[in-house]
Amino acid sequence: MSVLLFFSSCSKGKDEVEEKAPLIPPVSTFAMDFDQLGQPSDTGGLREANSFHHWGYAYLNVLAWHTAVNFAMFVPVAAFTESFNHEAIYDPQSNKWNWSYNVNANNTTYLARLSGEYVADSVEWEMSITQSGAYNDFVWFYGTSAADQSGGYWLLNENPASPQLILRIDWERTSNDLGSISYLYIKSGDAQEGAFIAYGASTETLNRYYVIHNQAAANTTNIEWHDSNLNGRVKDPAHFSDNNWHCWDIHLMDTFCD
């Protein structure tokens, strides 16, 4: 991915620095990749289901978050993804760059406006969405990214009918790759306030991971796997009644851990 415009040396004025629109952080900083752990079709379909208990349990935990997040973020993700197909226009009054465009989601057309503003060594972002006849300029999410796109965060509001914060997204990038991304559920007063899922890459043999915390159950599930071989392991004290890793092989079948 491209690297965000670096701020120039002190000898250059602010106007020179800001004459180019900031580069939008990649979609991977907003929409977590839930599809790397494998799919039920990878099991072959003919083996006994209980042969895939370890992988299956890990998969179902990830699927639960995927389903919930997809419901909450369908329109925001569609609007964010579409922004890369449009050019920004600078507004000197607000000192912001604006991307304005129509986007289709759920068989509905929305007017989206993404704005970006340079603030010191960061860029502040805001996504406003309008649905004709329903609501105008609803700020669905906003956030901040580092000027070098090494990291940042997003804050997501639930929806126009319930305009309260529900999700904080923190992300880090290393080189051109996403290092990690986490979703923290922050809906005030909800039993699951404080629940989270974190996804990332590592240099370990099992080089991908999820950490999933169920706040209501006070339980954490750790999942690690290899991104191409798909062998991996899961640890969940509440489910397995121990603190041990439980492994699966490259065919996703249960196996003993080394």
Image: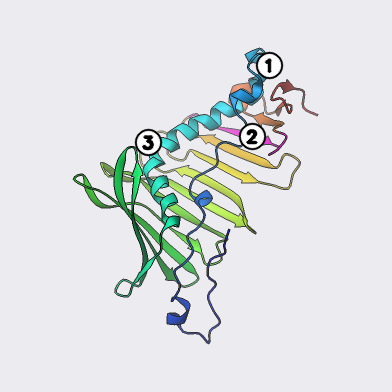
Q: Amino acid at mark 3?
A: Asp
Task: Mark yes or no: residue 215 visible.
Answer: no
Q: Is residue 19 above or below residue 122?
A: below
Give whichever of discs 1 and 2 has the lower sequence position: 1
Q: Which residue is mark 1?
A: 51
**Is the residue marked by circle 3 packed among few (<14), some (14-19), or many (20+) residues within 10 Å?**
few
Q: Splitting the image into 4 quarters, where does residue 222 fall? A: top right
The residue indicated by pointer 2 is 223
N-terminal label among 1 and 3: 1
Label 1's element?
Answer: helix
Q: How is the image coloured?
A: rainbow
* 129 is higher (above) or lower (below) than 92: above
> Callout 2: helix, strand or loop?
strand
Residue in view at x 73 percent, y 28 percent: 250
Q: Amino acid at mark 1?
A: Ser
Give the amino acid type for the residue marked by disc 2 in the picture. Answer: Ile
Depth order, front residue of 69/1: 1
**Rendered residue at 50%/85% (across/down):** 12
Q: Which residue is mark 3?
A: 190
Q: Give me the residue at 66% from left, 30% from top.
A: 234
Give me the C-alpha separation between circle 3 and circle 2: 25 Å
Residue 6 covered by magenta stretch: no
Front position among marks 1 and 3: 1
Q: Position of residue 61 (x, y in %)?
A: 54, 29
Q: Are marks 3 and 2 in contact (CB under 8 Å)?
A: no
| Helix, strand or loop under label 3 | loop
Structural crowding at the residue carrying mark 1, measured as other residues with C-alpha within 10 Å and reported as few (<14), some (14–19) or many (≥20): some
Q: Is residue 62 visible?
A: yes
